[in-house]
Image (cartoon, rainbow, N blue to C red):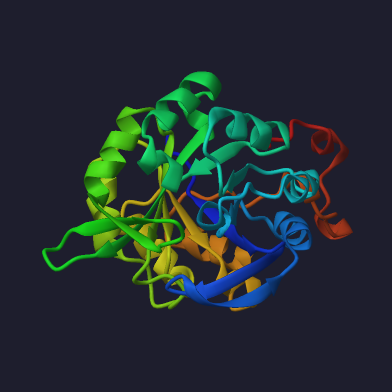
Amino acid sequence: MTLTKRVIACFDVDCGRVVKGISFVELRDAGDPVELAAAYDREGVDELVFLDITASHEERQTVVDMVRHTADQVFIPFTVGGGIRTTDDMRLMLESGADKVSINSAALADPSLISAGAQRFGSQCIVVAIDAKARGDGGFDVHTHGGRRPTGRDAGAWAQEAVERGAGEILLTSMDTDGHQDGFDIAMLRAITDVVSVPVIASGGAGNAAHMIDAVRQGGADAVLAASIFHFGTCRIMDVKHAMAQAGLPMRLEHPQFDQPQPLSQAPTPSTKNGDHNA
């Protein structure tokens, strides 16, 4: 069975507001996370990722109330990360409405956190986020704490270890291309998708639908994540999804939670109107 490819909207949150920068700096305000979550759900995005980008650096937890309020507004899978250091932190996020948790700095500091989370909640709930930069020899180095600290670890080796420990998904961000809107780092994507068996989310560099198509076709990504182009109106979510579908990629184009009434001339007949509705 061919799995559909996903388009994901990312909320980088700082002090209760969605922000977006270039290569993890020069942040500018993009709006209220709760309002944006509801709007993106209506527009047909497949998933949301909510990242408190300063939580690890400032050693504070993700704002739980904001997670709850955001989760109340959406009917699609929702991942939350930032400041998650223990399985109890994971439990709190999941109980607050998240479907998955994303761990980054804490997982590198204590890789057993991945295993403990997978054992307690299932691998499907554990996303390991990897922020990496290219190095001179063609490899990619992992950074933590919002890109502030180089670890000296190779991204491919760390992705493999994370999956072996129970990660159900890898969220891969290129710090070199992040926010530039010139396309994803295809070489970095391929370096990871070639060595892991779980879905990989491409992050960092989306500027248009063509970039997303390349991330899937050339980079092997299972999902594409974007922030700036959605937050600031460069691209509409359903336009991107239709372009990907026209390129031959399997996409979910219906939105069952917010089906729009059909024109009378195209309305289904009574014999089919009450048939099965595939979610």
Rendered view: 175 above or below 93: below
Point out the image quarter for the N terminus: top left
Rendered view: 58 above or below 206: above
- Residue drawn at (37%, 37%), measured in percent from left and top? 198
Is residue 197 among the parts visible in the rendering? no
- Seen as rendered, the residue at the extreme top is 119
Q: Give 127 or 92, whichever is nearer the viewer.
A: 92
Q: Is residue 39 left or right of residue 130?
A: right
- Seen as rendered, the residue at the extreme front is 59
- Residue drawn at (63%, 61%), measured in percent from left and top? 13
Q: Position of residue 37 (x, y in %)?
A: 72, 57
Task: Write down the quadrant of residue 247 in the picture.
Answer: bottom left
Point out the image quarter for the C terminus: top right
Q: Give 14 or 257, whichever is nearer the viewer.
A: 14
Q: Position of residue 181 (x, y in %)?
A: 44, 77
Q: Position of residue 56 (x, y in %)?
A: 52, 52
